Image: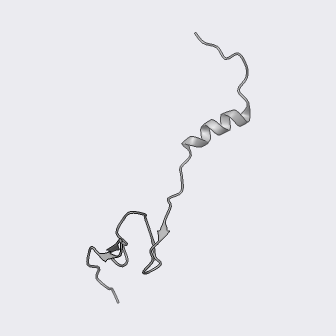
Amino acid sequence: MAVPKRKTSKSKTASRKVQNMKKPVYRASTSDSGAPALPHRVCPSTGQYNGRQVISVEVSD
């Protein structure tokens, strides 16, 4: 059975464990409405993608 030759330092352990942390969700602002939206997806507020209307969105008053 393999046994470590030296103690693993705190910084080495922490840098390994940081890969498992939850990453924040990146939200870009759309150019038309300025609303936050996920990249490469239809804007939920305007229904546009890549400068053209893809889905119709109902306006609520």
Q: Establish if 15 lies above or below 9.
A: below
Q: Residue at x 57, y 42 (%)?
A: 19
Residue 49 falls left or right of residue 9: left
Colour mapping: one colour
Q: Establish if 23 lies above or below 16.
A: below
- Image quarter for residue 59? bottom left
How many circles with numbers are drawn on the protein? 0
Residue found farthest to the top: 1
Q: Position of residue 2 (x, y in %)?
A: 60, 12
Q: Residue at x 38, y 63 (%)?
A: 40
Q: Quadrant of the N terminus?
A: top right
Q: Position of residue 20 (x, y in %)?
A: 55, 42
Out of 13 and 38, give the one closest to the viewer: 38
Q: Residue at x 67, y 17 (%)?
A: 4
Out of 16 and 54, give the one closest to the viewer: 54
Q: Position of residue 7 (x, y in %)?
A: 73, 23
Residue 15 falls left or right of residue 25: right
Q: Establish if 51 lies above or below 13.
A: below
Residue found farthest to the bottom: 61
Out of 30 and 19, give the one closest to the viewer: 30
